[in-house]
Image: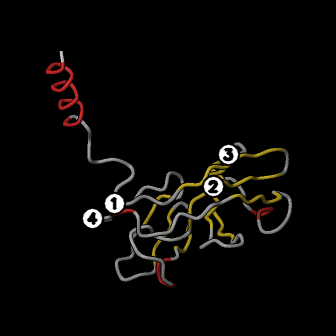
Amino acid sequence: MKLFFSIFFLFFLMSCDRNSVDDRNCRLLINIGMNHTENLTLSPLNGLSNGSSIIIYPPNSRGVIISNTGFGRYVAFDAADPNHAFEACSELTVSYPIGTCQCEDGNKFNLLDGSPVGSEGVLCPLINYRTQVTGNTLSIFN
């Protein structure tokens, strides 16, 4: 019976996939605790129409890109390219629906799902924050 459990345990360990979302290559940015709210009727979010994005700078953050995907739905991503250690050039510029890193490699990301766009060798998607709309308040958190 011990042999059976030993073989089963060994098989279980060997079947684990090393390609997970928690990729060691994607740990260049420090995980920032995010818990921020914005009033959707006040500046700067009052001009955030369907199919547009904006960067805001909550306290103790590198910036957050908020995109209005339509029908009262919002997505939020960290404004820094996770494929670099944080530096001035790694902050993304926004031209909806694409965010572009200002470093030499010019990595591009889809601002609707955070995935890399057309960049060979880009391993890490943008860091995603959860969003929730309650009345006129947008909560951004992780």
- In the rendered structure, the answer to whether residue 46 lies left or right of residue 122 reads right
Q: How many other residues sit within 10 Å of disc 2, few (<14), some (14-19) or many (≥20)?
A: few
Q: 87 or 113: which is nearer to us?
A: 87
Q: Earlier in the sequence, mark 2 or mark 1?
A: 1
Residue 132 percent across, percent down from the top left:
71, 46
Q: How many other residues sit within 10 Å of disc 3, few (<14), some (14-19) or many (≥20)?
A: few
Residue 37 percent across, percent down from the top left:
77, 58
Secondary structure at numbered mark 1: helix
Q: Nearer the viewer, mark 1 or mark 4?
A: 1
Give the distance between the C-alpha atoms of the residues marked 3 and 2, in whole angstroms.
10 Å
Residue to which mark 3 is pinned: 73
Q: Earlier in the sequence, mark 3 or mark 1?
A: 1
Tag 3: amino acid: Arg
| Residue 83 marker | none
- In the rendered structure, the answer to whether residue 89 lies left or right of residue 137 reads left
Which residue shows up at 33% across the image and 60% down it? 24
Tag 2: amino acid: Gly
Marks 3,4: beta carbons within 8 A: no
| Residue 121 marker | 4
Which residue shows up at 19% across the image and 36% down it? 14
Q: Earlier in the sequence, mark 3 or mark 4?
A: 3
Residue 103 percent across, percent down from the top left:
41, 81
Tag 4: amino acid: Gly
Give the distance between the C-alpha atoms of the residues marked 3 and 1, in whole angstroms.
31 Å
Give the distance between the C-alpha atoms of the residues marked 2 and 1, in whole angstroms.
33 Å
| Residue 51 marker | 2
Which residue shows up at 21% across the image and 22% down it? 5
Secondary structure at numbered mark 2: loop
Image quarter hosting the N terminus: top left
Give the distance between the C-alpha atoms of the residues marked 2 and 4, in whole angstroms.
28 Å
Marks 2,1: beta carbons within 8 A: no
Tag 1: amino acid: Arg
